[in-house]
Image (spheres, grey):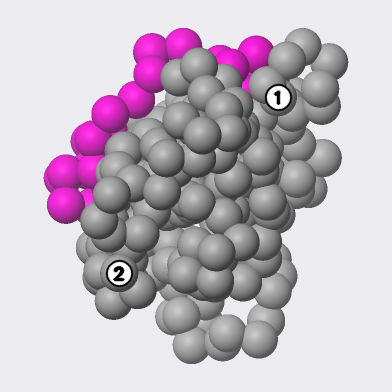
Amino acid sequence: MNAVNGLTIAVPRGALFDGTVDLLTALGLDTDELRSNDRKLLFEDIGVITMRPSDVPTYVEAGAADLGVTGKDVLLEQSAQTPGEGGREVYELLDLGYGRCVMVLASKAGPDPALEALRRLGVMRVATKYPRIAARHLEETGRQGEIVEVKGSVELAPLTGMVEAIVDLTATGTTLRENNLVVREEIVVCTARLIANPVAHKLKAAAIDALLARLRELPAAARGRGAPDVPEPLSSA
């Protein structure tokens, strides 16, 4: 099969790659080269572009791909907190079910240093790769926070005393436990999501609707469960 309903799809490399390629295979796409060539980025014959998960909304918003797959964490982090803030203008079409992780607030085991900082100073320092999600969560729960954005191992920040807590994504909690950190709060469950370019969603509505119908017909093991009835622009989330 050359492409899924003639649509171009942005596929994430990394943790969601295998599940996404399995999904494309279940739809009848020839994914042999996609699986075997991790250096090639553009697979024009099957309508697939591969990239980092965080870049998927950018390419879909720009129209370089009609559809894309990325994590809910990426969508939440790139969505606008307030009108006019500049969140990605893409539609979230379907919860694909795989790649399940949980965004959590964690701190060192024992008495919660974040609570102590709030009691003494009225503010807690939080390290994270997801500053928008962290800031939004603290604001929604009525707490004052100083957000420290880090790119590497976020678990190191509370161990060195730079912050009192972290906001991060975890699948099993093993890395947290190995670094003497405990989950204090679960913020949101994140899974792989199918997103669409708003213009493509209108101009290629028949092809996209047909694809969604095929996805919903697949066994749960192939695609997971859940889908909003009406696609919503993420910038209005």
Q: Residues within 10 Å of mark 1 (few under 14, many from 20)?
A: some
Does any portion of residue 140 appear in the rendered image?
no
The residue sitting at 55% across, 39% down in the picture is: 124
Q: Are marks 2 and 1 in contact (CB under 8 Å)?
A: no
Q: Residue furthest front?
A: 120
Q: Earlier in the sequence, mark 2 or mark 1?
A: 1
In this orientation, which residue lies closer to the viewer: 102 or 9? 102
The residue sitting at 28% across, 49% down in the picture is: 111
Answer with left or right where residue 24 lies relative to residue 98.
right
Q: Amino acid at mark 2?
A: Asn
How far, Cα to Cα, is label 2 from label 1?
33 Å
Q: Is residue 125 magenta?
A: no
Vertical relation: 96 (above or below) 137: below
The spot of residue 177 in percent (x, y) is 26, 69
Vertical relation: 129 (above or below) 190: below
In this orientation, which residue lies closer to the viewer: 9 or 207? 9
Q: Residues within 10 Å of mark 2 (few under 14, many from 20)?
A: some
Please name the residue that numbered disc 2 is placed on: 180
Answer with left or right where residue 203 lies relative to residue 190.
right
Does any portion of residue 232 appear in the rendered image?
yes
The spot of residue 55 in percent (x, y) is 70, 54
Q: Is residue 218 magenta?
A: yes
SS for dot 1: loop
The spot of residue 59 in percent (x, y) is 75, 48
Q: Amino acid at mark 1?
A: Ala
Disc number placed over residue 96 in the picture, else none:
none
SS for dot 2: loop
The spot of residue 61 in percent (x, y) is 75, 36
Please name the residue that numbered disc 1 is placed on: 80
What span is colored magenta in the figure? 214-237
In this orientation, which residue lies closer to the viewer: 193 or 132? 132
